[in-house]
Image (spheres, rainbow, N blue to C red):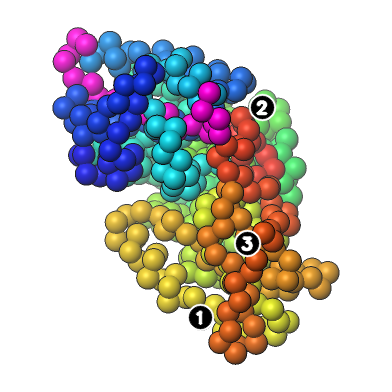
Amino acid sequence: MAGALSEVLGEVLVTADGEEVAVSALAARGVSLVGLYFGCSLGGPCAQLGASLAAFYGRFRGEAAAAGGQRLEIVFVSAEQEQQQWQEAVRAMPWLALPFADKHRKLKLWNKYRVSNVPSLIFIDATTGKVVCRNGLLVIRDDPEGLEFPWGPKPFSEVVAGPLLRNNGQTLDSSALEGSHVGVYFSAHWCPPCRSLTRVLVESYQKIKEAGQKFEILFVSADRSEDSFKQYFSEMPWVAVPYADEARRSRLNRLYGIQGIPTLIVLDPKGEVITRQGRVEVLNDVECREFPWHPKPVLELTDSNAVQLNEGPCLVLFVDSEDDGESEAAKQLIQPIAEKIIAKYKAKEEEAPLLFFVAGEVSGGEHRAASCCVFVRGRTLVGYCYRHLSGRHDRLPAGLHQPARGCAPAHHPGHVGPGQVRDGCGGDHT
């Protein structure tokens, strides 16, 4: 256990009193699951979570005292930039924390798990270091007694099992989804980007069905009332989880670690994820020629997929030309690198830690390469300007940067505010 967990957390953690605890010692305590708590000392959502998480953690500590073994440990990964604020936050916590001085590892964890809002709680297996559940906040709410421990992922068919609705009131069993590609659509009427996407998605859905493809969309509502759900669902030609079945809606949110809406996750007929970026794919491929949208190693940066720049480290190759041929040549330049990195992490059953883009001319005739370099959470991975296929690759000045148009500003962990998410609509999705 120590090897995998040390690779994630380092060698040493600290207690509220400043005492050091070796990561290797967690194995002796019987810890099988570690919750990474990304938060801050500010009020609001972090303060609210702190109270409920302390009660949740206390139940496991009590169990450990009675049984002689501790199944769960929490590790605080702070968003604080000032040591005094960090100390104040840690002092009130009964669990362990990443040392304040280990700033490089903190940034690495935020990027590795693509945390885009606080508070966030991600459970990882203490033996393998792999993610067990990305949305631990829902675990605390739905299973406060820990009866479903260790909250590992279940097959889509098991989580979705039960009756589904059509907007005419007809019901059908979830088994009707078997053998089809499925788009699991997390959305709400109160969210403007959701309503915009729904209009496009209705057209895409109809085109795919007319082409003879076996495709269904499952609406998982984040509406705030059943009346709002009914009004919104009346615009949709697909099926939905009944609004009253809050437990099933929550389990689907947990299964896919939903942190913001709209989100469209496309599954293959076996229920395995093809892409989590269904929203981007639908907007980029309005004719649905590339359905079911298997991921590409290198993407062309557009206004619709610029939101991905906020999801983690990105490498962007800028093309200082209006010639489409140069964009394609630029893709070919970095594609072998992208494929090698993706294959390496796929072999470990992990997501690649880096997204690859080629950026050319944008609307208005401006060139991103002429004016900006991509920063992700306060640091640049690399920004290159690709010029005229001459073999010359000029690194852009480190000081030139601006967020891609249409997406939220990129943030360092210390600048992420409570409740902020990567997209225009917040985390109110259950």
Residue 161 x, y percent position in the rendering: 41, 37
Residue picked out by circle 1:
333
Q: Between marks 2 and 1, how big is the CA–CA gap?
A: 48 Å
Q: Split into 4 quadrants, where in the image is the C terminus?
A: top right
In the image, taking residue 30 as reference, residue 119 lies left or right, namely right
Magenta stretch: residue 77 in it? yes
* Residue receiving disc 2: 224
- Residue 354 at x, y percent in the picture: 47, 59
**Of residues 202 and 50, the one drawn nearer to the viewer in this rendering:** 50
| Mark before the other along the chain sequence, 3 or 1 | 1
Question: Which residue is depicted at the point 49% across and 75% down?
Answer: 334
- Mark 3 → mark 1, Cα distance in angstroms: 22 Å
Q: Is residue 13 shown above or below 234?
A: above
Q: Secondary structure at mark 3?
A: loop
Mark 3 residue type: Ala
Q: Is residue 240 visible?
A: no
| Secondary structure at numbered mark 1 | helix
Of the residues under marks 2 and 3, which one precedes in the sequence?
Answer: 2
Give the residue at x 53% y 23%.
Answer: 84
Of 346 and 196, nearer the camera is: 346
| Pair 3/1: label in front | 3
Q: Are marks 2 and 3 in contact (CB under 8 Å)?
A: no
Q: Between tags 2 and 3, which lies in front?
A: 3
Q: Amino acid at mark 1?
A: Leu
Task: Give the labeled residue for mark 3.
Answer: 398
Q: Residue at x 69, y 51 (%)?
A: 407
